[in-house]
Image: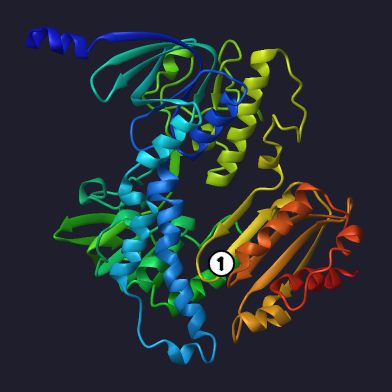
Amino acid sequence: MSTGQGAAEAAREVDRTVDVVVIGAGAVGENVADRAARTGLDVVVVEKELVGGECSYWACMPSKALLRSGHALAAAQRLPGAAEAVTGGLDAARVLARRTSFTSGWDDSSQAQWLDSAGLTLLRGTARLTGPRRLEVTGTDGTTTSLTVRQAVVLATGSVPVLPDVPGLADASPWTSREATSAREVPGRLVVLGGGVVGVELAQAWARLGSTVTLLARSGLLGGQEDFAGELVAEALRADGVDVRLGVSPTRVVRDGAVRVELSDSSVVEADEFLVATGRRPATSGVGLETVGLEDGGSLEVDDTGLVAGVDGSWLYATGDVSGRVKLTHQGKYDARATGDVIAARAAGPVETPAWSKYTATADHHAVPQVVFTDPEVAQVGLTAAQAREAGMDVKVVDYDMGNVAGASLVADGYTGKARMVVDEQRRVVVGVTFVGQDVAELLHAATVAIVGEVPLERLWHAVPAYPTVSEVWLRLLESYGL
């Protein structure tokens, strides 16, 4: 075969007809593909980067690995006897090595093997819709595969960081969460822009690893949470040496070796790296939405089964961040399970999809759990007090100092934290819970169960917490309510 013939063969177009195509092999895409394939559907998964996606390599796992060693050291320092045994600080190189182990060195071969073991076909490349139920996949090897889909196409392409429109910022090579979670060295000085979850977690992680950190936020920290959550986290960050500056924004950024950040209060901050953590948008550009009547790069509207609105026929679905719903990995996986199940069911015939069925992601509207893995942790599910009032509920709010719980006093001397329970008085059920304190993440699922199950307070009273555990905060909250 001649060289020209070989090139033509490598670029050949392959035509395939399959049942389901999932675009994106992150945690969400893997889940929807797995559930759809369990009844025997032929499922193809397309991924242009690493199988396992953002959470595995640049978000959930590496960020928590960066935080955990610092949390363990701080916990030991709060306990007499253990504190005296702590003779040094963190070994940053070992923390970074442990972080890297959780990403498998950014090698996705084990995750690709899992897809194969689940009976899923992986195409490495970039997928684009070319019309209803049709796609084109440009492979990393130069081949083009045209796919015709019998049942469903699922967009699970995630989200991408948003850079604010600040003069000089784009040219200053800022870090996003990807660079911040995969860095090989501790920056001497780091500026973090954004007071949300990513901003506060990575500010604390790098500060405890030895970086001099400045955190910039236009308002308070952790907007959308109960106010005391952001306040307690801000106190903890300052105790770790983070320069927390609220009510300021960058007006100009210049990189000339170091990064120079000019601020709205006329002050200037210099750093070695500048992390932008100001939010993300759904990754809908370039996937061919315009070929099916939607706007390229536009937002998507989906129902509780994941079906995309505005498209003729019931074949296009979206799950995870790209759907515009809750941008949390665990919630995206929950959405994906519902979508995968409903695709499989609809392949066999019409199916009812009532609220709270296995085919609907109803919890997205009522009981979304979230943990901010700072020290103290913030664990929240359901509605805040303000959100419950805005929803027109007759609300009673119960607060309790977690330091007064016997189990918490055993966890750490001088335990600092706060719990809040939000009650819908008409139904006498819990609609929101927030815990702030050391290791409170493990309290959250009990709150989630109470809200999803709409457990009446009088019945919840009979769920007796073991003594002495931090879970005794439930007893104290219910006693403070009046039971």
Label 1 crowd (10 A; few <14 / some 14-19 / many >=20): many
Residue 292 in the figure: left or right of residue 4: right
Does the rendering let one see residue 396?
yes
The residue lying at 36 percent from left, 56 percent from top is: 101
Q: Residue 457's x, y, as percent?
A: 88, 59
The residue lying at 70 percent from left, 79 percent from top is: 407
Identify the image quadrant of the C terminus: bottom right
Front residue of this view, candidates 206 and 24: 24
Q: Residue 452's x, y, as percent?
A: 76, 47
Front residue of this view, candidates 321 and 27: 27
Whether residue 125 is situated above or below residue 257 in the rendered picture: above
**Residue at numbered disc 1:** 377
Asked which quadrant contains residue 89, the reply is: bottom left
The residue lying at 55 percent from left, 15 percent from top is: 311
Whether residue 242 is situated above or below residue 144 in the rendered picture: below
Residue 228 in the figure: left or right of residue 148: right
Task: Check disc 1 and give the amino acid type.
Answer: Glu
Residue 171 in the figure: left or right of residue 127: left
Whether residue 122 is situated above or below residue 193 in the rendered picture: above
Q: Residue furthest left?
A: 2
